[in-house]
Image (cartoon, rainbow, N blue to C red):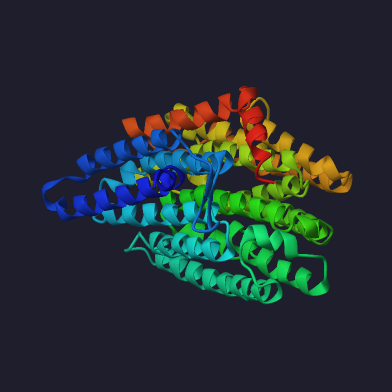
Amino acid sequence: MNDFFSLMKHELILTILLVVVLILKLGKETTGNSSLLRVINLLLVLNVVAGFLANGTGELFNGMFRMNATLALEKNILNIGVLIISLQANAWLKTHQHLLEFYMLLLSTLLGMFFMISSGNLLMFYLGLELSTIPLAALANFDLEKRKSSEAAMKMIMSSAFSSGILLFGISLVYGLTGSLGFAELSQHLANSPLMTFVFILLFSGFAFKMSAVPFHLWTADVYEGSPVAVTSYLSVISKGAILFVFVSVLFSVFASMATAWYPILCVTAVITMIVGNLFALRQDNLKRFLAFSSIAQVGFILVGISGSSQPAMASVIYFVLIYVFSNLGAFGVISLVSALTGKERLEDYKGFYKTNPLLSWVLTISLFSLAGIPPTAGFFGKLFLLTAGAGKGNYILITVAALNMVISLYYYLRVVKVMFMEKNDAPIEKLPVSVSAKIALLLCMAGVVLAGFVSELYQYIYSISFGVI
């Protein structure tokens, strides 16, 4: 029983939080949104703190559920991201009539991601995936009065159903070929063959839908644009981070023996994802669509790092996702605040933004610099480690393509900075009031963007605990 509580601590805490939110819902008529937000944010802070305490290592349910130091760190990264998103969304949620329903759905999808990350069996993985996806579709439709929000939810449901069907087909073939769904058993039975390569393509396609890799990315921009900014942040950072964690673990632990088959698939996908993401980001005027295609391009860089198929690859992906959480949420934090208070989301609306909101302008600028990989921000070190890991197999053509795409990305990131600092606007966005919670969220993001790159012990720690996963 002690092992059960120790190994499933993250999941049990989230379940308790869900029960607390449900109880708060029963008494909502006597409590205002501001008070509820303070209580929920405090609970999320306690959740983050508890996530770093007394984490066990082992298995439950005959190996279906696993826990170790790496998986605990991955869950803690997601917990931090959810806390920041909650703090940033205060201005929007204060006036929303379905505040508690938002957190019920948010915590439910996070619980599914935790089960997905700890899965040691394809069936457990699929159940966690569905638990994390279905509430997300409801969250995408959370701006009930907006037609675009309903469209986003419908597109997400349709694309998720299609990708789940492909994934289930691959899982059924795996069971038919090996007679097992456990990761440990599968790693011993898989071997290079045309049929197994086809099975891997099916499974990889399911993963690619969730991580928005080209050509499975077509739903991403529309869903990001139609969803509320807080939900777009969650989709871009938490959802994508969770599926990348699982993908790296499955690739290195289950399909390691098929590396010669999946390596060229990974390389081609990485190249077209970087190129398509960058080219479409160049054309965007809506900032949510802009960050959507930016996130697609970032997945391409992550796939370059994963292609290294080594301990540095695993460590570089976890490290980059941690930095990506701070960088992307820093950018979304400013966009969320502007959207909630003014309703403006287009790039041209940010002309002269620095004149009226210098602090928010600098936060957005530093976040974009980190996403672009400009030193001395942490994003530079994150991409450096990804490219170094990807070079582990000596594929310098792939590294060259990635480096050229980094140069292309500089243009559209700096384009936003140019609009804010250098272009004039007769009626710029007025000076915006920034709540205490939003200031804390932005401060956390800036601290992560600046410090994560200079605290070398952080990467060394991630590298040291990554060894047991591969």
The part of the image, by quadrant, that contains residue 324 is: top right
Outermost residue on the left side: it is 30
Q: Position of residue 150 (x, y in %)?
A: 40, 67
Observer able to see residue 453: yes
The part of the image, by quadrant, that contains residue 405 is: top right
218 shown above or below 443: below
Q: Residue at x 12, y 52 (%)?
A: 29
In this rendering, the count of numbered labels is 0
Q: Position of residue 384 (x, y in %)?
A: 73, 34
Nearest the viewer among 462 and 154 is 462
Q: Residue at x 82, y 73 (%)?
A: 194
75 shown above or below 117: above
Nearest the viewer among 256 and 91 is 256
Q: Position of residue 233 (x, y in %)?
A: 48, 48
Nearest the viewer among 97 and 310 is 310
On the rendered structure, is 414 left or right of 344? right
Q: Residue at x 44, y 66 (%)?
A: 153
On the rendered structure, is 107 left or right of 166? left
Observer able to see residue 427: no
Q: Residue at x 66, y 39 (%)?
A: 466
369 shown above or below 32: above
Outermost residue on the front side: it is 1
